[in-house]
Image (spheres, rainbow, N blue to C red):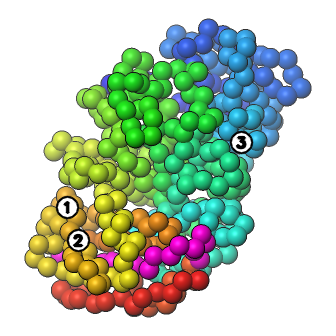
Amino acid sequence: MKSLGASLLLGATVRDDGVMFRVWAPRCRTLDVVIEGRRPIALARQEDGMFETLVEGLPAGTRYQYRLDGKHYRPDPVSRFQPEGVHGSSMVVNPAAFAWTDQGFSGHPTSDLVIYELHVGAFTRAGTFEAIVPHLPELVELGVTAIELMPVAEFPGSRNWGYDGVHLFAPQSTYGGPRGLRRLVDACHTHGLSVILDVVYNHLGPEGNYLGDFGPYFTDRYRTPWGGAVNFDGPEAEGVRRHFVENARAWVRECHVDGLRLDAIHAIFDASPTHILTEITTAAREEARALGRPMHIMAESHDNDRRIVLPAGEGGRPLGSFWASQASMSATTARGVTRATSNSARRDRTALTLAGGSPACFPMAKRRSAAFPLMASSFALSLSATTFARSSTTRTISSTWCARPCIFASSFLSISRKFLVAPSSRSATRTFPRSRTA
């Protein structure tokens, strides 16, 4: 099973002659677009449950809702901006209106990634995308080559971990919306930093989740720890799959992100011949090629399944890299990190030794000719323990655990830059200095 057809612009698309509204709603008999200051306009239903209509002379910035079967008013499930939050009206956005200046940025190969994971709402006092920009030179000085943003898809409230997002195409309004995210990504590229975005495709949050009113997006055949599973392989799943594949495309095409970190893929259930993760990866890489940059796909999984990174010809997905959440608890209690290599780490395992503790080894399927990052998150929202395997060496960077809500890049400037250069071929052991908190 695959998603329906080729890439299709869903939602409200700005054209020269107006705005095309397109939404997949097989559960609806009728569907109208309700625009502020205008009478409701009916969308024409297509055979596959798609509704669409062109509204001439409509500018970007217009607010609208959909009316389902003449009675239920809902935001656009493919909204690019929710200025009033998850329950409010959607806003027409024209991604092409943003003046990108990153044409000279070519991205980073996997082996050069040094990732700093951050939470937009906690990284600065302002808690916005644009408030991060002044700190980018500090991250560059630290030796970081990529930032990873925790989930930013619109969620209820003003601050959240981000894993209960419900509008997957809309960057969080309280963080600055789509314009703020684009300005951050553009600035990162100006400073030579790649941007990886954490996306959640295994479930949606409970509040403001209206997808089920439009179509069979969820199934009770599987369960996740957070609620109903997404219907990737059941009846009418083609339209559901398209929604998520197009979301991956949109983040790359419209926001120029350089990578996606796929949350908890062990909770993504799909028995189809072509797994949804394969489709998502293929689509994201296709959009990245159009921009002339590499696309980094990282999968978080509890299963330690080597098929995550194996080539498709060998039964793999293939996503490219494995994000090791099992290291999280060890990493957050670390007071330092020892860089270590051993014979057991040279092929199928990467050894991460925590100072004052015993070595913790994490399985990682690896081909000799490629390097896959093995990343452990930190509750401190900081660069906690990022391990990079290259040939027979590992490279790790760590900060001590910090309970303070705001972690600034300057907190980690005590880590000498000399430890952040590309790893040498020597098998050596070095203890990184303990970093200070802000």
Label 3 SS: loop
Q: What stretch is highlighted in magenta?
A: 390-408
The answer to which of 230 and 247 lies nearer the viewer is: 230
Name the N-terminal-most of marks 3 and 1: 3
Image: 148 above or below 313 = below
Spatial separation of the CA atoms under disc 1 and disc 2: 10 Å
Name the N-terminal-most of marks 3 and 2: 3
**In-image side of 219 versus 364 (left or right):** right
Residue 401 sits inside the magenta stretch: yes
**In-image side of 412 versus 41 (left or right):** left
Q: In which quarter of the image is residue 356?
A: bottom left
- Return the residue at label 2: 360
Image: 126 above or below 343 = above
Residue 407 sits inside the magenta stretch: yes
Q: Can residue 108 be seen in this view?
A: no
The reply to whether the C-beta atoms of the residues labelled 3 and 1 are less than 8 Å apart is: no
- Quadrant for the C terminus, please: bottom right
Q: How many marks?
A: 3
Residue found at x 51% / y 83%: 412
The numbered mark at residue 85 is 3
Kindly identify the amino acid type of the residue bearing the numbered disc 1: Pro
- Return the residue at label 1: 363
Residue found at x 49% / y 62%: 148
Could you say where residue 162 lies in the image, as x and y percent from the top left? 55, 51
Could you say where residue 193 lies in the image, as x and y percent from the top left? 52, 70
Kindly identify the amino acid type of the residue bearing the numbered disc 3: Gly
Residue found at x 31% / y 89%: 431
Residue found at x 14% / y 72%: 346
